[in-house]
Image: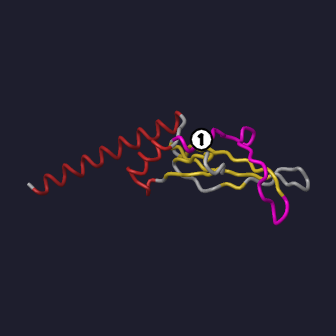
Amino acid sequence: MDKIQTIWATSFDHGYNVGDYPYGFKLRTTIRYWVEDKFVKGELTQRVVTCTLNPKTGQWNKPKAGVYSPLAVIFEDKETGRVESRGWTFYDGYEALKVFRDTYELSGVQNRFINDTLAQYEALYARRARAAELAQA
């Protein structure tokens, strides 16, 4: 937690701006980051979106959106000063979700999602362990 700073940016208007970002071969510009939330069938999905400022016209370019995942976070690495993003999917599994929770400072909706998902995983593992015990008996 000491090496990273979680960034709370949830829309274009409240995005996190980083200056001196490369634009083409010679130009420099500003890039804006934010996490977009969407609820699909009552489930939270998130993705990281970026948008650069055209240094020639002063207009914002079309936003570039990543793929949806159940959890996404943007953060600044304090050692390098770079803005990075991470996501968690169900393919990553139970242990990765616990690491994700412990590594990043998360919002209330994200914490509720993590707590519910961890409870579901724990119930599933308990059922599997019980079934294995019964199979051996």
**Residue in the image at 48% along x and 37% along y:** 111
Residue furthest top as drawn: 108
Q: How crowded is mark 1: few (under 14 residues within 10 Å), some or many (20 or more)?
A: some
**Residue in the image at 82% along x and 56% along y:** 28
Quadrant of residue 12 within the rendered picture: top right
> Which residue is label 1 attached to?
5
Residue furthest right as drawn: 57
**Residue in the image at 59% along x and 41% along y:** 6
Residue furthest front as drawn: 79
Q: Where is residue 105 in the image (x, y as percent from the top left)?
A: 53, 38
Q: Which amino acid does label 1 sit on?
A: Gln
Q: Quadrant of the C terminus?
A: bottom left
Q: Where is residue 25 in the image (x, y as percent from the top left)?
A: 82, 66
Residue 92 included in the magenta stretch of the image = no
- Report the span colored magenta: 1-27
* Image position of 8 with respect to 61: above or below: above
The colour mode here is secondary structure
Q: How many labels does the image show?
A: 1
Q: Which of 11 and 7 is in front in this view?
A: 7
Secondary element at image label 1: strand
- Answer left or right for 55 relative to 18: right
Quadrant of residue 62 within the rendered picture: bottom right
Residue 10 included in the magenta stretch of the image = yes
Q: Where is residue 108 in the image (x, y as percent from the top left)?
A: 52, 33
- Answer left or right for 16 relative to 137: right
**Residue in the image at 46% along x and 42% along y:** 101
- Answer left or right for 98 relative to 37: left
